[in-house]
Image: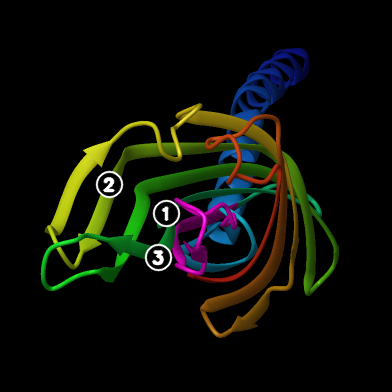
Amino acid sequence: MAVGCRQRRRCSEQRAHRVLGSVSPRLVWLLWATSLASAAEWGVTVGVPLHGPVISTKFPSFCCVAVPESWTRHPALGVSASLPLASHLRIRLDGTWQRWGISDTASGLTYQTLPPGPAGLAITKQATAANRWRVPALLQWEPRRHIRLGFGPELSLVTRSHSRYEIRNPFTGSQSFPVDYFRSLDRQAVFGVGAVAEFPFHLGPLTLAPDLHYARWTAKHYNTNFPLDEFSSGIALRL
């Protein structure tokens, strides 16, 4: 009788071990995934360019007075996510949009023999505008509570790029027409490597994270007006 009881107890213990052995990995995985999800941050980001993404040139349309212009200070707006991978390691994914462009304006004297001549000031402007999309995927290391250092690949994509040529002549009036030779788009998509220093602060459920962002591009969107080095400052607000 005692032998039968011991055998039944041994069998029940073996079944319990088998059940725990099959449940424990799933339970551990579920707890790990739950903890990661609770530490994930989702929100929005805004960035201001400090150097780049486009620069102006001082090449005039014709040799008189040239006033170079560039729209390099338009902010970049988008979404931001910071996802934990392990202790002190995270991955940061952003997707931003920025309106950008380049233009230059030149002026010079023009002449005619008929009234109201003989001389007048003609002004020409050449301008390019486009949408710029930027997607970095950065592996972040968190050595301190308020410091995250990130490094990883980036993609820059330009869409709907178009150029126009405008001329205002006091004798013949104003003209405007599209062109494709000015600030020509050499590459629609370019790849690069980015490095980010982020400084997150937790305000209740919110995470406020200012950052400094550097990127080194392997190619240029515009041959003369797109620098390979780009530097920006931004801030992300995440839940």
- Gap between marks 1 and 3 measured at Cα: 21 Å
Closer to the eye: label 2 or 3: 3
Label 3: few (<14), some (14–19) or many (≥20) C-alpha neighbours in 10 Å: many
- Gap between marks 2 and 3 measured at Cα: 17 Å
Label 2: few (<14), some (14–19) or many (≥20) C-alpha neighbours in 10 Å: some
Query: Looking at the image, is mark 1 or mark 2 earlier in the sequence?
Result: 1
Find disc 1 in the rendering and name its residue: 101
- Residue 19 appears left or right of 193: left
- Residue 122 appears left or right of 40: left
Closer to the eye: label 1 or 2: 2
Q: Which picture quadrant has residue 24?
A: top right
Q: Residue, x 68% and y 44% (percent of image)?
A: 138
Considering the numbered disc 2 on the image, is that residue within a helix, a strand or a loop?
strand
**Tag of residue 39:** none
Between 1 and 127, the one lying in front of the other is 127
**Tag of residue 107:** 3
Query: Looking at the image, is mark 2 or mark 3 earlier in the sequence?
Result: 3
Q: Which picture quadrant has residue 155?
A: top right
The residue stretch that appears in magenta: 56-82
Residue 97 in the image: state x and y as whole percent: 40, 53
Contact (CB < 8 A) between labels 1 and 2?
no
Quadrant of the snapshot with the N terminus: top right
**Tag of residue 164:** 2
Q: Does 71 lie within the magenta span?
A: yes
